[in-house]
Image: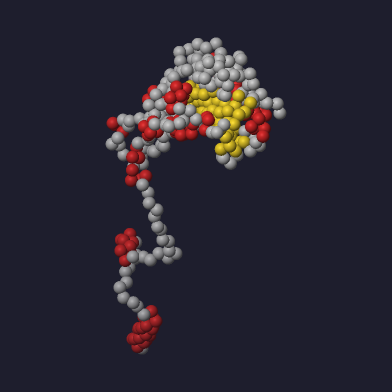
Amino acid sequence: METVFQEFSSYHGTLVKPYYWLCPNQNCSKCPYHIRTGEESRVTYREFYETFGFPYGPTMHEDKQLIFYEIKSFNGTVIQKGQVTGCAASNIHAEAMLFEKHGYLDSLLYQHDSVGYITLYANFTPCNEYGHFCISKMYDILIKYTQMRLDIYFSQMYHVEVNFPSAVWNRDALKSLAGHWPRVTLNPLSDGIWKTVLCTFVKEVPETTMNQYILPIRASADRHNAYMIHVITGIKPYFVEDPPMPQPEETRHQPKYQTHKVKYNVAPHPPTGFQQYFPFFAPQISFVPAFQSQRELITKPKQVVRHLNMPMNLNEEANKSEFIPSARKFTKVVNTERTVWESDKETTRNKRKKKKRNI
């Protein structure tokens, strides 16, 4: 396999020269080593803020492109972590360097068959502009290594507004790339992902930054990114953490069975001139009929005992005798045999008396 890069080992990782003709340049502080692995991939907190705009908001330095990447095996073990920067002097994007054919990543995937996941944490979304073709190079790697999954987390959108001539190309390329879902995902960086990147790739992170909540400006930018990527690709990001919304006063003292908590994902309006419509999904609320009361809703299981011959109560007998005229109530036990014998004896006496009278 022909390689178009040079690799040098250092005490804390590996330094990679993506192109053989790159050399130190005053216009680019990262030249010639734009790919770094291991501890060499860690940056200062100031550099992280200037490129990613966390936690105070986006910075929009398009000449500073920075990508952190993690390569994992199928079982989740981290094989390598590193960073890729764009070259401002040669006008080469970071994605074009990393996904170059016969480049460093291509050679790494060719040698390791166990690679299953590649995760990118980028300050900009990849583009497909003339001269860069970042997304096209991603396609070539995805087609070559069919078992690999690619997850991209970004901080800012790159040239997707209508005032850029290449906006149509970038939108179509992003939509085509996201069409490989779930193998390829595009998500804005959220609060939890921010802190993961800080712990993994930033040196000497201030303790106050790790403990504080995400600021409103940064949260608003993340929601806007989630809205834009949903409009462009048609696929909603997995999660976007919104700040908690206060509960209205009129619903605080209502019974629990009448209160329905609905979470709305409010996103800022798109830029002027960007016409896109998407369906509105009404919140699902459980329906309770009006004739049912609260006592009827709370039901308990009843234990029913069934008998073949149900015993009759004396009170029930008295109630039945009121409605049945021929019914009589007995309070003593009668010997039927003695009653029949006495009746026959009385009949015999009457016959004898009648016979004497006739004589």
Nearest the camera: 306 or 261? 261
Quadrant in the picture for the N terminus: top right
Name the residue rendered at 43%, 27% in the picture. 45
Name the residue rendered at 57%, 19% in the picture. 24
* Image quadrant in which you'd find residue 34: top right
User: Relative to residue 27, is residue 265 drawn left or right?
Assistant: left
User: Relative to residue 140, is residue 66 drawn left or right?
Assistant: left
Q: Position of residue 183 (x, y in %)?
A: 59, 32
Is residue 266 among the parts visible in the rendering? no
Name the residue rendered at 35%, 86% in the picture. 349
Name the residue rendered at 67%, 32% in the picture. 110
Q: Is 158 placed above or below 104 here?
A: above
Report the coloring of the rendering.
Answer: secondary structure
Nearest the camera: 167 or 136? 136
Quadrant in the picture for the C terminus: bottom left
Q: Position of residue 113 (x, y in %)?
A: 66, 37
Nearest the camera: 275 or 15? 15
Q: Position of residue 105 (x, y in %)?
A: 62, 29
Q: Is 303 placed above or below 215 here?
A: below
The furthest residue to the right? 1
User: Relative to residue 103, is residue 341 drawn left or right?
Assistant: left
Q: Position of residue 276 (x, y in %)?
A: 50, 18
* Image quadrant in which you'd find residue 72: top right
Nearest the camera: 35 or 192? 35
Is residue 336 among the parts visible in the rendering? yes
The furthest residue to the front? 11
- Tally of numbered discs: 0
